[in-house]
Amino acid sequence: MKGYPRRAPGNCRVTLSNCRAKYWGKSAKLLFCFASYDLPMTGSDDELEEIRKRKREQLEARLEGESLSEDEGNEEAPPEPIHIESGSHLEDVTDSHDVVLADFYADWCGPCKMLEPIVEDIARETDAAVAKVDIDAHQRLAQQYRVQGVPTMVLFADGDIAERIVGVRDKAELVSLVRQHLN
């Protein structure tokens, strides 16, 4: 069985190696193996190349002594929410905008649906960027930011977490909170 490739659920390739058999009694045998998994890549080659290009540019700018915050920190906030595609995408958004309101939501969540038009209004009416993070698609991000219930909003100011809001809040309260950190 050494090095014998097997198919695992989800198109993973599993290779078993260093297998050892242990015998108990006359006929009981237990096989111990070390498994290694080759997970399939998600995303297209073009997406990966774009991420590599963006990261390369950021690293080159750092090496040249340019401040990323001067170049990217004053980027104008878009008038609609930014749908986050990965952890590095959220990091790029928080690095390129002074204030970011990240809305961690789920499609099946009723209160999240109630909050959606409020979040869209905040994106349109304030100078803060608004990011939307689907917790079902990005479970690691939800864990990283300790999202235990939805909706949860995390307010970033200058790249750092400034506030954490759990549950539905009215528009006036959220706008006030965002404007407080814009000044």
Image (spheres, rainbow, N blue to C red):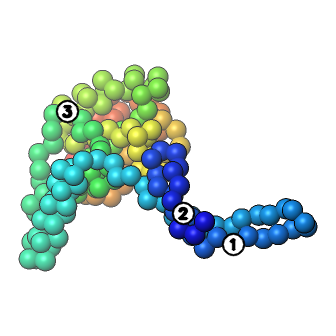
On the rendered structure, is 119 left or right of 1?
left
- Could you tell me which secondary element the residue under label 2 belongs to? strand
Q: Which residue does the image show at 53% across and 50% down from the upper left?
A: 8
Crowding at dot 3, Cα within 10 Å, few <14 / some 14-19 / many 20+, comes out as some
Quarter assignment of residue 66: bottom left
Amino acid type, mark 2: Tyr
Marks 1 and 3, how far apart at CA: 58 Å
Crowding at dot 2, Cα within 10 Å, few <14 / some 14-19 / many 20+, comes out as few
Q: Which residue does the image show at 45% across and 38% down from the upper left?
A: 136
Amino acid type, mark 1: Arg
- Looking at marks 1 and 2 on the same chain, the residue that comes earlier in the sequence is marked by 2
**Residue 62: image location, x then y, percent:** 15, 73
The N terminus - image quarter: bottom right
Q: Which residue does the image show at 82% across and 69% down from the upper left?
A: 23
Outermost residue, right side = 25
Frontmost residue, 7 versus 106: 7
Frontmost residue, 174 versus 2: 2
Residue bearing the label numbered 2: 4
Q: Residue 80 carries which label?
A: 3
- Could you tell me which secondary element the residue under label 3 belongs to? loop
Q: Are marks 1 and 3 in contact (CB under 8 Å)?
A: no
On the rendered structure, is 92 left or right of 26?
left
Tell which tag, 3 or 2, sits nearer the viewer. 2
Amino acid type, mark 3: Glu
- Looking at marks 3 and 2 on the same chain, the residue that comes earlier in the sequence is marked by 2
Residue bearing the label numbered 1: 20
On the rendered structure, is 58 left or right of 173?
left
Frontmost residue, 139 versus 15: 15
